Image: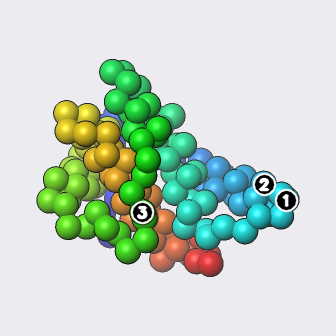
Amino acid sequence: MPELHSAGPAEHIDEAEVLRRFDEKKRLLETLGGKSEAKEIFREAFREHTGALLPQTGGVLSAASKTPRAPAAGHVHRDNPALDDLLSLALDKGIGAAVRKARSETPYLIDALHDELADHYYEKLVAAGKLKQE
């Protein structure tokens, strides 16, 4: 599986930090008596981590987090050629490059890109035995 590369240190996906955020969110949810799917908790942790890495110039990234999200189930986004291009770009040149390109498109693409990258990275960590699929 391709690694998530970055164009510079400011765009680095810190696996340990994402896992820390995941564990923190999961423990908090369990403490409050809630139950959620591990993949959804991971998506939120990943979204927070990548949001903290990327500059929020132009307000597009901020707007993306406020835009209603498309349903995640079944990966409805997979039939979108623009999203496929962004995923390839993110895996080849880094998430920052993909987000910069998506900014010229629509906030929906940024949101969908985050979801797809989070799913990709979640599956990678499960396969490596660093997360348990629940």
Position of the C terminus, as image quadrant, is bottom right
The front one of 38 and 69 is 69
Residue located beneath label 1 in the image: 31
Q: Is residue 40 above or below residue 11?
A: below
Q: Secondary structure at mark 1?
A: helix
Q: Quick one: label 2, few (<14), some, or many (20+) residues within 10 Å?
A: few
Which numbered disc, 3 or 1, marks the residue closer to the eye?
3
Residue at 40% x, 32% y: name it: 63
Instruction: Tell me which corner region of the image, top left, top right, bottom left or bottom right, holds residue 99.
Output: top left
Q: Is residue 129 visible?
A: yes
Q: Say which mark, if any, is on residue 58.
A: none
Asked if residue 23 lies left or right of residue 80, the reply is right
User: Residue at image x 31%, y 67%?
Assistant: 76
Residue 52: give x, y in percent of width and height: 51, 34
Disc 3 secondary structure class: loop
- Residue at the location (34% across, 30% down)? 60
Mark 2: which amino acid? Leu
Disc 3/disc 1 C-alpha distance (Å): 27 Å
* Distance (Cα) linking label 2 and label 3: 24 Å
* Image coords of residue 88 (percent x, y): 21, 56
Foreground: disc 2 or disc 3: 3
**How many numbered circles does the render carry?**
3
Q: Earlier in the sequence, mark 2 or mark 3?
A: 2
Would residue 10 be visible to someone looking at this image? Answer: no
Quadrant for the N terminus in the image: bottom left
Q: Position of residue 116 (x, y in %)?
A: 36, 60
Label 1 CA crowd tier, 10 Å (few <14, some 14–19, many 20+):
few
Residue indicated by mark 2: 28
Q: Which residue is mark 3?
A: 71
Residue type, numbered disc 3? Pro
Amino acid at pointer 1:
Thr
